[in-house]
Image: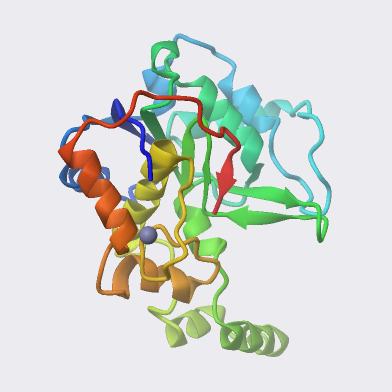
Amino acid sequence: MKAIRLEAVLLYDEGTAGELNIEEIAGYLRDKLRRVPVEVRGNPFVFCREKDPDWARKLASIKVQDASRKLVAVQEPLYGEIQYEQRRILGKTRAFGVLYDGFHLLRVFSELIPREERALGFVHVFLTNRLFATWDDGDRRYHARTSVYGPCCVISTTGIVEAPARSREYYVLKRQYEMLGKDLLELKERFKGDFIDYQDARLTEVVKGYVMQAVLYSLTGDPFCDDKGCRLYNAHWQAELIFAQLESGYEFCPRHAGLLQSVNEEIGEEPTCLSTAPMLN
Ligand SMILES: [Zn+2]
């Protein structure tokens, strides 16, 4: 497998609400990619403050109001929605309950990247707690996502909790709890540990695997692996996610372990044109 040479990995904290230890993630990357500089940049809107004052409007205009209606053009937001985004950008409020169109969010974050770093070889990773979704033409509705890989990569802690499905048994019982008006917290307690939850102590470890998917996307154009025990596995169920990221007993399959080893041993090829189609998890 041919891999391009990486210039740097840049980690942005786009409001992960203290759920992640980003320095620990950076340390992990430095360990895995010994030749590649890794930088933690904090809030991207502060880092790029002077470039465009209109980020709040842009973000407010890409919200999904109705999961069964595709966002075809960006919509004109209300004043209050822009104010909310302004506070959110400055870290004065959290982004719960808002759903964004994933591809539009990817584009807004891409615009934040400094011009001189808009090149293959720079891995820009936006860690956020914003929940985003992408439209599916098959069943004609939005589906929540954990991550999207493209000109930059966006990984959502809320998406990790909400997007991969929980067990079928959980959903059956949830319906019963709702019908009987029982406390859903009790249900969560019954399944504790079976899925990643908000403020979950395992989130930082899980996100390390997703950041490696972003790295592999930049290296080869493909962030995923078919091996269910490899951290690059594209998990659709919480049980799969937990197995791939925490329980399989190894981090990477032999093919990807070998690729990472070759990245550390020799300088890869000059960046050439890879497929730039975004990929989703
Ligand atoms: Zn693999």
**Percent x, y for residue 110?**
52, 26
Above or below for 81 versus 202: above
Q: Quadrant of the C terminus?
A: bottom right
The answer to which of 220 and 31 lies nearer the viewer is 220
The answer to which of 64 and 261 lies nearer the viewer is 261
The answer to which of 201 and 80 lies nearer the viewer is 201
Q: Quadrant of ligand 1?
A: bottom left
Residue 249 visible, this orientation: yes
Toward the top, the furthest residue is 50
- Determine whether, in the image, residue 249 is placed left or right of residue 189: left
Location of residue 257 (image quadrant): bottom left
Residue 33 visible, this orientation: no
Above or below for 199 versus 156: below
Q: How many marks?
A: 0
**Residue appearing at x 76%, y 45% in the figure:** 65
**Residue appearing at x 44%, y 53% in the figure:** 157
**Percent x, y for residue 56?**
59, 25
Location of residue 115 (image quadrant): top left
The answer to which of 19 and 196 lies nearer the viewer is 196
**Residue appearing at x 49%, y 84% in the figure:** 186
Toward the front, the furthest residue is 1
**Percent x, y for residue 15?**
42, 40
**Percent x, y for residue 190?**
45, 87
